Each structure stands twice: as C-alpha cells, then as structure tokens.
Amino acid sequence: MRQSLTPVLTAMMLLGGILLAYPILAMGAHVPLNHNEGWNAYFAMRAIHPALGPLYPGADSMVFDNYPPLSFYVVGALGWICGDVLLAGRLVAMASFLACAALIAHIARQLGASWQGALFGALLFVLCGASFYPIYIGTDDPQWLAHALMLAACAIVLRSTLPVTRPGGICLAAGLMVVGGLIKHNILALPLSLTIWLALRDRRAALAWCACGIVGIAATVSILGGLEGEQMFADILGYKRLYLARRAILGLTNAVGMVGMVPPLWLTWRQRGSMGSPYGFVCLFTMLALGLGVVQRTGVGVAYNAQFELLIALSLATGVALSSPLVRTDRQRRRLALVAMLPALIELPVTLPHAMRDLSALQHERDAWQQAIDRIAAIPGPVGCEAPLLCYWAGKPFVIDLFNANLAIATGASMTPFRDAVTRGAYAAFVLDAAAPASRAAMNGPTPITDFIHRTYTIRDTRFARIVILSRPDGTGAPLR
C-alpha cells in the first residue's frame, strides 16, 4: 500500500486528539459527563465499603442494580488506591476505549490488513466514537472495559486458529470472554459470532471454546454468588425492562453515522470465500451486531451504546477492505477511505466547534456545577438526585434511583413503598434535571414517581446549571401528617 494513506492518517490523528481533549481534561473535574456516572460510582463505593449498602439491595429498595458485579470491584479497588472511584472509573473507561482502538488495529492485521489499513480502521473507530457517541468517551461506565476484554479474547482466538488450531489459546480466550461478560452482560454479537465462526471452521476448536466457556461461567457465577448471595441473581435476572417497538428506529438512526463503512463491508463480503474464512468472520460479526443492536435498542434505558459492537465490526471491515486486492490503485484506496470517513467529516462542522467550546468553558462549568453541589450538600437530610453524580459529589447517601424506580412502576411494581417513604420523611429534597430529565426522555411516557414529586414537593431553587431543587413544603424532612 506504500504511503498512500499517510496524509489521511495524520489528519485523523489530529482530529481524534482534538475530540478527545475535553473528556481527558475533564476527567478529574466535578462536571457531569454522563447520566449513569453517579450510579456506577455509588455501586463501586459499595463494593469497597459494604457498610454503605449492599450491591444488590433487593425488590424492597428504591435503589436498583441489574449489572454484574465485576466492574464495581475493579473500579472500586482502583478508586481505593487513587482516592476517588469516579476518577478511577473515568480513567478505566478512557484507557479501555483506546485499548479497543489498538485491538481493532491488531485484529485487522491478523485478518490480513496492511499496517496502514489496520491503523485507518482503528482511527476511524476513535473518530466516529468521539463524534457520534461523546457521552460514552472517558465517562465512568463499564461498557468499553467489557469490549476491550472481549476484543482481546477475539485476538487470542484468531492467533490460536490462523492457520493452526491451538486449544490452549482458545480456552484462555474463552475465560477472558467470560470475564468481559461479567463486566457487561448484554454484549452478545462478538461471542456469538466467534462461536458460530469456530463451528464453521473447526468443530473441535468450537467444542473446546464452548466447554471452556461453560466451565468458566459456572466457576465465576459460583464464586460471585458466594460473595453476593442469591440476591445477585434475583436482581439481575428479575430486572424488568420496558420494551417499545418504535425505539427500534433509534437503533437504525444511531447506525446512520456508520453508513460510509458499507462499501468497505461490501468489499469484505466479496472476498470472504466462505463464512468460515477470516473475512467471513468479519461479515458475520457485522450482521449480528446490527441485528442485536437494533433489538436491544427497543429496551427503555438502552442508549446508543447498543451500537458499539457494530462500530467495532465495521471499523474492522474497513481496515481489511483497504488492504483488499480488489482495491487496485492508491487513488481507489484514498477514495474508499474518504467514503468511510464521510459521515464523520459531515459532522465535523458541529463536533469541532462544540469540542472547542467545551474546552474553553471547562473552568466556568466546573465552578457552576460546584456551586450546585455545595447547595445540595447544605440540604439537611437525604436527597434524591435525578443525576446521582450530583448527590455523590455532595456526599449524600444513595437513597433512590429515580430512573429505575420510574421504570419499575411502569412495569408493574407498586408505588406504595415510595409513597410510604415520602410520608415518613425519607427524602428531604429532590434534585431534578430541568434541561434533559433522563427518566422522562428515555421512557417517552408517564413517570409516576417524578410526577408525584412535583405534586408533593415545592420548587425551591432554579439558580444552578440545569437543575431544579424541590424540597418539602415545610423545608424539612419531617414525616407528613
């Protein structure tokens, strides 16, 4: 391929650096980056300080946990070392995102891509991720860590099967894949595509993969069950989610930013040979990622992170396609690269100015949010925050998860425990997000708990960035009479 893509790669590195500057510089700041950050931080704190509350509180609690526990242990341990679990979670997420990019380049090379093609696929992943999914870049969320572990498992599988099958490597990869699933349990396309691909390529390797995976799942579930008890299974498996068919449209629209990678995927499909070939694996992975992402997006509360596996698969396909013998000239290669980048390039007039504004306003944002946090900290008694991160920074206990509480009511749970808690004065105040109420925006429908708060509590303060503080009419947390 010579140096045909060098100017493009240089420009992509520069753009990626600009887009990643804000989440990197904001990593230690008291500025909310993602609605879920506080939720993850609170449970990481519980993992290292059990006296704060159990990881799996049970059905009678206003706090809900439907995630496997491993990410909380990892981030909690790192947070104990560095003194801040939120900072630890952000560092892990950013490192994992960059590790995903590096593993995409490595896997593309294993699949036959040149170093320039592999690097292009990795940089395209970074550019699209930072352009289209910025609230998941460098934010305290376990998603990218799980992807990184599963991509590492994929790299080991490919190394162990191309060209000669090595069962030891396959068993190691199966164990790593299980660990990734215990970080985030709804990442399905990559493990499924590897299982099907191995079955098509080498049945003995597929049997070793499945056997080691089953043993790994049984062992880890047994260990974690011993640590957390039966309540862990009840909370994860018994979690009820509201599914809306119309939300599938969101899954398709969230994939529009990747439409430029369709021509490279088509080239990969043309050279696949059979589905058991390395190129066949990429095609299989892409198809499963698209289908499963759209299906998962129908769930209320599932954001566009459901499309991350599709982004990874298409980035791999693009890296492989740029090295294809079907692309005969440097001119064709550059055109194909620009087509793959086109949606991100079209978005640049929006993303670049926004990134620069965020950087220039970071200190102002930090000061504004700190004033709001200080105001929340000054409220006597427990406070429920729609964005739990604000209550976390204010040093308040985690007393209610408003999004999941609303969702529980919408899926059939009784509202009586919440009403009883309000009556006995369990919540001195609530802090709601005036600009983007997450629970209402996600559910697209009634939110009984939020509506009850507005009827029962009185707006006290709207001076602070994005938030509305509501407190009891008497200004205290005393029981209602």
Image (tube, rainbow, N blue to C red):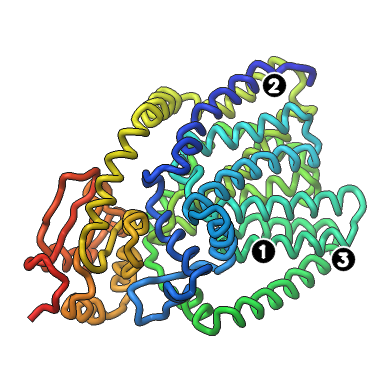
Secondary structure at numbered mark 1: helix
| Residue that lies at the very extreme toward the bottom in this rendered image | 230
Q: Which residue is mark 3?
A: 204
**Residue 294 in sight here:** no
- Residue 255 image position (x, y, % from top left): 49, 42
Query: Callout 3 environment at 10 Å: few (<14), some (14 to 19), or many (20+)?
Result: few
Q: Can you tell which mark lies on residue 333? A: 2
As drawn, which residue projects farthest toward the right?
164
Q: Is residue 400 above or below residue 363?
A: below
Secondary structure at numbered mark 2: helix
Residue 308 relative to residue 30: left or right: right
Q: Amino acid at mark 2?
A: Arg
Residue 106 spot, x, y in % from top left: 75, 40
Disc 3 is placed on an element classified as helix
Name the residue rendered at 46%, 49% in the picture. 304
> Which residue type carries mark 1?
Val
Residue drawn at x 17%, y 66% is 453
The percent position of residue 141, horizontal first and vertical second, equals 50, 54
The earlier-in-sequence mark between 1 and 2 is 1
Please state which amino acid type lies under the numbered disc 3.
Arg
Instruction: From the viewer's side, name the closer residue of 228 and 396.
Output: 396
Mark 2, Cα crowd under 10 Å, few <14 / some 14-19 / many 20+, is many
Give the distance between the C-alpha atoms of the residues marked 3 and 1, in whole angstroms. Answer: 23 Å
Mark 1 Cα-neighbour bin, 10 Å: few <14, some 14–19, many ≥20: many
| Badge 3 or badge 2: first in the primary sequence | 3
Judging by the rendered image, the residue that carries numbered circle 1 is 179
**Looking at the rendering, which quadrant does residue 205 occupy?**
bottom right
Q: Residue at x 49, y 70 (%)?
A: 49
